Amino acid sequence: MIPRPFRWLPKRDFPADQWRLIERGHHDDLVGRTESLFALSNGYLGIRGAYDEARPAHQRGTFINGFHETWPIVYAEDAYGFARNGQTIINAPDGTITRLSVDDEPLFLSPAADLVQADRVLDMRNGVLERELVWRTPLGKLVRVRSQRLVSLRHRHLAAISWEVEVENAEATLVVTSELFNHQDAQSVDEPTVFDPRRAKGMQHRVLDPAFQEVAGGRIVMGYVAHNSGMTLACGIEHVVSTECDYQTTSESSEDLGKVVFTVHAKPGSPFRITKLLAYHNSKSVPPSDLAERVNRTLDRGSDSGFERLAERQRIDLDKIWDRADVRVGGSDRLQQAIRWNLFQLIQHTARTEGTSVPAKGLSSQAYEGHYFWDVEIFAFPFLLYTQPHIARDFLRFRHSILDRARQRATEVNQVGALFPWRTINGEEASGYFPAGTAQYHINAAVMHAIKRYVEVTGDEEFLVDTGAELLLATARFWYDLGFFDEQGRFHIHGVTGPDEYTVIVDDNVYTNLMAQMHLRYAADVLEWLEAKHPDRHSVVIDSVEFTDGEADRWRQAADNMYVPYDAERGINPQDETFLDKQPWDLEETPRDRFPLLLFYHPLVIYRHQVLKQADVVLAMFLRGGEFSPELKKRNFEYYDPLTTGDSSLSASVQSIIAAEVGLHDKACEYFKYAVYADLADIHGNGDDGVHLASVGGVWMNLVYGFAGMRDYEGRLTFDPHLPAEWPSLEFSLTVEDRVLDVGVTRDHIEFRVRDGDDLTVWVREKETKLISGEPITVGL
Amino acid sequence: MIPRPFRWLPKRDFPADQWRLIERGHHDDLVGRTESLFALSNGYLGIRGAYDEARPAHQRGTFINGFHETWPIVYAEDAYGFARNGQTIINAPDGTITRLSVDDEPLFLSPAADLVQADRVLDMRNGVLERELVWRTPLGKLVRVRSQRLVSLRHRHLAAISWEVEVENAEATLVVTSELFNHQDAQSVDEPTVFDPRRAKGMQHRVLDPAFQEVAGGRIVMGYVAHNSGMTLACGIEHVVSTECDYQTTSESSEDLGKVVFTVHAKPGSPFRITKLLAYHNSKSVPPSDLAERVNRTLDRGSDSGFERLAERQRIDLDKIWDRADVRVGGSDRLQQAIRWNLFQLIQHTARTEGTSVPAKGLSSQAYEGHYFWDVEIFAFPFLLYTQPHIARDFLRFRHSILDRARQRATEVNQVGALFPWRTINGEEASGYFPAGTAQYHINAAVMHAIKRYVEVTGDEEFLVDTGAELLLATARFWYDLGFFDEQGRFHIHGVTGPDEYTVIVDDNVYTNLMAQMHLRYAADVLEWLEAKHPDRHSVVIDSVEFTDGEADRWRQAADNMYVPYDAERGINPQDETFLDKQPWDLEETPRDRFPLLLFYHPLVIYRHQVLKQADVVLAMFLRGGEFSPELKKRNFEYYDPLTTGDSSLSASVQSIIAAEVGLHDKACEYFKYAVYADLADIHGNGDDGVHLASVGGVWMNLVYGFAGMRDYEGRLTFDPHLPAEWPSLEFSLTVEDRVLDVGVTRDHIEFRVRDGDDLTVWVREKETKLISGEPITVGL
């Protein structure tokens, strides 16, 4: 991979801490990035880490997973089967704004403000964003503001803020304005001034049609209907005041803004504190007025609990998750902080998704329109599978819930079976650029791969019977229909785009063909198993896919004869049939400021060169390692690595994992840094626009599959660790069926302990190792 | 080619006639098609053949070449270098509507109307559309309406209508309403109900902003500014009445409608006649009020002349053109009619283009947005070059006028030199689908090819010095930059789309590589010649393209080492490097109602199969015949012909020409029918949406290059005729430098006569034949 730039946060102001991301002082140049880095989420509701005072802000954002608007895609040149409707996650009304003015002087964090202190802390063990600020007003009054914010893991529809102000050295008149504001329709609809297609498209119409506003004391509840999609929302805020100061309250509301205003006669030593509760309920069709009931109940529950109880529960819930999910490395607090920050993102953005999947940016931004991609099944999945398998299962159930749409999509592109949309919220294909959208048929295999691993690791056969088998079969027959046998009997799949989007519509992409092969075989196996073990369900499933006689045999025939390009002269796998005929891109001569290439070169220029966004042959060597000899892996890696820009955030961790496997340990360490600091050091230059959730998932993979050298082909756990030189240790846990397996790696040995559940067999560098429940076992390296 | 359907006009009602297209009776099911077939144009102004009475109508259309609106292309997924602005020809205000009511009964041609007679005649020698109608009103009055319509070849901005009504058997009160109406902004902006991307995109905004309306007696002049493009228009109508009946006139005008109303007290034997003049002036920037002056002058001149004088001049001008352009075949009036109808389209739609090019549909429709494509240089060009070379030259000058934009476009796609837009009106790329747009780099070579042929046939070296050389060099260096030398020293061009749009973004497309080879060589030759003969101009030109030392040598090296795929096993040229690896499309098994494929299959499905829209290897064999042995031509033709759907209207004539060359005379005749009846028998099913101008150009090529077997490689005229069995003779004329060469072919011999100018040498089946000016020479076959 070419060297990637680190845009480090200033170390002095962002000190190392094992469990907390800390910012000291206000950084006007980091407003956008810290909104992303300090974002909170529970997987249903996500709130960017924007300041309480409304500005400065890059993009204030409150997102509800799956709550989206649709809009017709208008093509300058249309064609048959193109996706018809765009989908964009809506920026839901923002309940976090609390404005303060002291003797009519408004508080704003600006370089001009006299700030004695301005700290923010994301506490990843508590799941709380804290803030402490001391401001010297133009009149010399010292104003201390403390706030804490959480998005509740326990109460899915609830967020809470504890906000407190105290004037330390004088009396003063404070005006505190707490708002609920619809940014979506106040956002500028202009095109972004900086060209970046990864950002969300501005919608040109009013998105949230107001349904009602209710004001009652400190409580405001507002209802909306999304103009095109018809999705409904009710949201509300409630305030519980605790103070010894005199104050008055007024409240009001209009279509896009509800506000509660507190006028406070503040005295030194007497803080004014509000507990603010935020509640959101949405639906495909329930009227907003009915949702308002639910919002009121959520607000009631929240205010009954109070902030402290909510924070306590948050800690309890997180403790449970960290107990299975934490990864510890010795030697560097800063690295430990970065690792935990990454894991925390995956934890919080997936915790309560329930019935949806998780967008590429989690709920930290509107970028990529809030769409779900294959990232979930390939990059986020391993972490979830080995730490919180019920969430992994839910993501697969989500796929099942959109299976009918995937069937319809297959028909729209003139094929049989089912084809999952490349990007979607509601199940319909939303990609307006099919060469890097619909042509990425490999998403079907990503779903298959996740099912296979899920069943192998959890042993959840019931899921396979109920849900998995139907998914597998409907998508397997798509592959068979897509490809064809040539005159020599080899099975080809033409006109596809692999994960590396820097070439498109190619023939026999190695990644795609190997994954399709696995898919066809596994589907045939599962079908056989289903017939033997669950004949009734077998009948139902084969009916549902209109199965024909001998179809599974034909799948096996296609899999057995799958053509995988190999270049004997160079001894490598060409990425696709003609990849090696392309002109190599001169990456050495490309100025560093021309990356990512996609922002500076026409797609045709990129497509005609040997240059990679991400190395999909390398990904294939990870997912289907058994298909490549060690020597071939090394040759492939050494061929593709120098051609890889890493312009995709999916790239670094997989590149690191295979670098470790083929013995290129310096590269493994370097690429791991690109992964673990992808967001924290803004490697991709778009840190303002949210976190890279797949990269974050890659970090866990990098640690476990890369440095601990774990592989889990066919449900067999093997380890071949290679710790970076400066790491004394690496510890993590794996949930396997009902057990928790604690793993500790040092330079000399690897230690296992089955914490709960049955005995287990693992392999360390080919050596079979039987683990007895409760007994630590150490294997020398 | 697969069999194409003929949707014949009913023969009885459309009788054969050598010079006229005749419709007897009203055909409600042919309203759209006859609007296209009866369209009139002079290349500047085009008017669809819609009825005077406003309805029934498919789409009333008045088009001014180059008068267009722009609109931002919004991509659901954007990328660097994508075209930014769409361009659409505007449906200019319609001045042809003349409504009639008799005793308050409005005249409309509907199946319910009692029509005694309803004839229309397109007279192709006179350039006039005539109409005669006898209507029996519900009260039994016999109303005869005669009208004649012309778009003046002499007066570029003028159209004229002679409209006459007479009540034959009674007195009556007639109300005659003559209108000037802005359809563009009255058009429904809904998406078309039938999916067909070949149609124009509805624009969603008000296009023509009204600038002024002037009403003075029977004259109305209106001014507009196109909302986004800022282009300006003034248009007007004037009326000269001739009658013995009493009548009153009123006139009025609003933003979108001007009308003059005549209330007539009609008596039997006393016709009421209006001569209506229509004038249009447009500009990029001149204020509409200034343009109004020009409109007034045009209307003055028109009314001074009167309809008869205008018609007389029309005939004189057309006589001159037909004298050089006519093609006569013996034996069938119907075939002769069809041939002349085709030639007439090319004549009228190109006559006064002056400074613009000609849209794919001429000025007969808004389809393809009124864009200019390569069709002009490859398909329309030969006819113009050999009959009216000044128009051919003007089209090349148009290319020169947009050369700066082509340079800019090359920069936008990260290349050096110049790249002509795949589709455009104003010179900017307007294609919103680059795989079948920008990737069709071969448009550069089409311009080169036209320049080369133009210079060879006309001997116009001055043009080459002034205009041609700069065009050639700027575009040649694009090819060199686009391609690359492989390790064996072969020059490749990757990631292109050839003329066959049923595969895209392919490597080493045979057509593209052979045309680029010709381009590089010819540019190097011209450069050398320029340096020797016109050293001053040479300096200017090489400065203008920032020429580097040895660049021409490198071009020759690339041309000499151009890689042209050849498959030794099959003994054919693969269309591109991987074409033969694709799965063949089963055309036999494809239902006939699933053509054109592009309306029924997702592009990915089409792209991954061996199936052709048009056979571009076959086109290469026509344009670069010397590069293929006769045996190779035959093998190639026999391989590609069965894979060719002919879904492109550019397909049939070229297929016929090569079928004739390789001795497949039945196919040659069959495919010629698809070309010559493409519009008349609505072969492509979209006859409502205008004429297929490239197909029409192909008809002339089919006759001259196909059946007369002419080739003109390197300026050397050779003939190898193969007349269809049922044709006694084929006669045509060629303008070569200053001569006119008349050619007559029969089954036994070919006769030449140099009508004007110097002696000339031609070759008949390899036999050199010296022609002496004025002396007919016959060569036996």
Image (spheres, coloured by chain):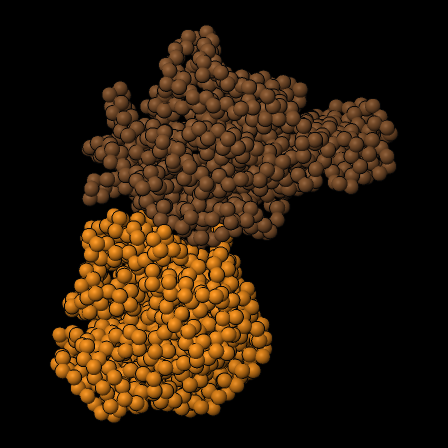
Chain colours: A orange, B brown
Q: Is residue B688 left or right of residue A652?
A: right
Residue B297 in the image, given as x and y percentages of width and height: 59, 25
Residue placed at 63% from the left, 18% from the top?
B312
Residue A9 seen in the figure:
no
Q: Is residue A39 above or below residue B258?
A: below
Residue placed at 46% from the left, 18% from the top?
B734
Q: Quadrant of residue A752?
A: bottom left
Q: Is residue A753 left or right of residue A67?
A: left
Q: Nearer the viewer, residue A26 or A532?
A: A532
Residue A723 seen in the figure:
yes
Q: Is residue A758 above or below residue B652?
A: below
Q: How many marks?
A: 0
Residue A733 in the image, given as x and y percentages of width and height: 27, 83
Q: Nearer the viewer, residue B199 or A447?
A: A447
Q: Is residue B505 left or right of residue B150?
A: left
Q: Nearer the viewer, residue B640 or A732?
A: B640
Residue placed at 43% from the left, 14% from the top?
B738
Residue B80 in the image, given as x and y percentages of width and height: 36, 51
Residue placed at 21% from the left, 84% from the top?
A769
Q: Quadrant of residue B64?
A: top right
Q: Is residue B241 left or right of residue A695?
A: right
Residue A31 in the image, given as x and y percentages of width and height: 33, 69
Q: Which image quarter is the C terminus of chain B in?
A: top left
